[in-house]
Image (spheres, grey):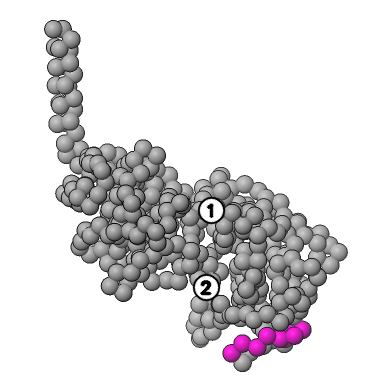
Amino acid sequence: MKALVFIGMILLLCAADLAHAQGHAVHVKLELYNDIFEADADVAMLPALDRPVNKRTISAFYDMVNEANYQPLINALAAYQKKHQLNDWLYYQLIRRVAQQLAPKQNDYDRYTLYKWFLMVRSGYDARLALANNKLIFYVYNDEDISDIPFFMIDGKKYMCLNYHDHPNTDLHQEPPYPVNIKVPDADRAFSYEVTRMPDFEPSGYFDKELAFVYQNKTYSFKIKLNRQVDSLFTNYPGVDFKTYFNIPLTRETYSSLIPLLKKNVAGMSQTKGVDYLMRFTRYAFLYENDEQNFGKEKRMSPEETLFNQYSDCDDRAALFFYLVKEIYDLPMIAMLYPTHITMAVQFNKPVGRSVIYQGKAYSVCEPTLQPDDLPIGQLSPKYQKQPYQVVYHYEPARTLPGQAGARQ
């Protein structure tokens, strides 16, 4: 009898706590991009997800979350995005972190994914859900050239899979996804993978890395500042087009530790010799290993990832070389893609070596990746000289107009 009374008291206390929680909020707090994100999430946003997960249970979950007071959380996300000028990819990393606090991925992957989707659509993005053999698939509208993740078409619009990395053994051709159609008002914005500005990180989070290479019998040493968070930002970043890929910038701390020193080292050189110096820095300051050996798959690294990682391949060297030449000399360049290789060519005032003609202009090959021969500017490795290539990116500096000194595209 005493046990029954005790259980009854516990039930009454639990009921009282639940009643007290109604209308209250769960505080979300996390540190990201050298700043604290804080917001309150209405507890009504945290219902249970019925099982099994299907169209009916997903729709019921959405209805309950949608009826909650979700707007303060969305407003806080939007304010943080605006304050830090976050591109879509970096904003999505913030949403992932918030969803992780609302429903930890390791505890309930489906709820975690539904929160990511809900926060994206309520932020205005055209995101969709689908089910593939009981797996919850999460897509977003994107009109860019993305090469290595699945997509599907709806009314002529392309939707890229944002959580394919969570289902590495799923073949979406063998297990075709079936859409979960939930119409969300004003969720029509396209998502972009362009990263044109890196976030600021806490300076104390950087570490020093030593780099060195020999140029004309002189050893040049560098101590650059790098942050491990940069590498994690691009863990699941897809294969974007070369223009997007080449134009991912460095963070402020890394830039300040490298670019001024490179500018100082080439200050007394001619333009051609300075580019040669940058070419050999990119070629010899890093160890080479192809992506299959390094990562087990194709992965294009941003310039800062190349500086961070011990190994890199020709894609990575081309992107880093492009970035350095653009920042220091801002010269016209083309990226030349061969069946198994990519290299760069630069337009000088006077061509060097054998020229590559593109759109009526002469470009000199600058090989940023280690080859069997020590190639100077204007010389292509013999094994590529008879192979066809494709110009996959053409960079032309913005022309300076009166009153716009220093303008760039």
Front in this rendered view, residue 146 or 186: 146
Instruction: Please state the horizontal and vertical placement of residue 206, each as a whole percent of the image.
Output: 58, 48
Mark 2 nearby-residue class (10 Å; few <14, some 14–19, many ≥20): some
At 62% from the left and 47% from the top, the residue drawn is 207
At 74% from the left and 75% from the top, the residue drawn is 383
Tag shown at residue 320 = none
**Label 1, on which residue?**
230
Q: Is residue 78 left or right of residue 328?
A: left
Identity, as a three-letter code, of the amino acid under mark 1: Val
The answer to whether any part of residue 346 appears in the image is no
Front in this rendered view, residue 142 or 321: 142
Instruction: Please state the horizontal and vertical placement of residue 146, each as a whole percent of the image.
Output: 46, 68
Q: Is residue 161 left or right of residue 392?
A: left
Q: Earlier in the sequence, mark 2 or mark 1?
A: 1
Instruction: Please state the horizontal and vertical placement of residue 6, each as a whole percent of the image.
Output: 17, 12
Q: Nearer the viewer, mark 2 or mark 1?
A: 2
At 81% from the left and 59% from the top, the residue drawn is 219
User: Number of numbered discs present?
Assistant: 2
Front in this rendered view, residue 229 or 251: 229
Q: Which residues are magenta?
A: 351-359
Q: Quadrant of residue 339?
A: bottom right
At 80% from the left and 62% from the top, the residue drawn is 214
Image quadrant holding the N terminus, namely top left
Identity, as a three-letter code, of the amino acid under mark 2: Lys
* Placement of 406 over or under 30, stated as above or below: below
**SS label for mark 1:** helix
Whether 5 is among the magenta residues is: no
**Label 2, on which residue?**
243
Q: Quadrant of residue 377?
A: bottom right
Instruction: Please state the horizontal and vertical placement of residue 69, each as a whole percent of the image.
Output: 19, 48
The answer to whether any part of residue 50 appears in the image is yes
Residue ranking furthest to the top: 2
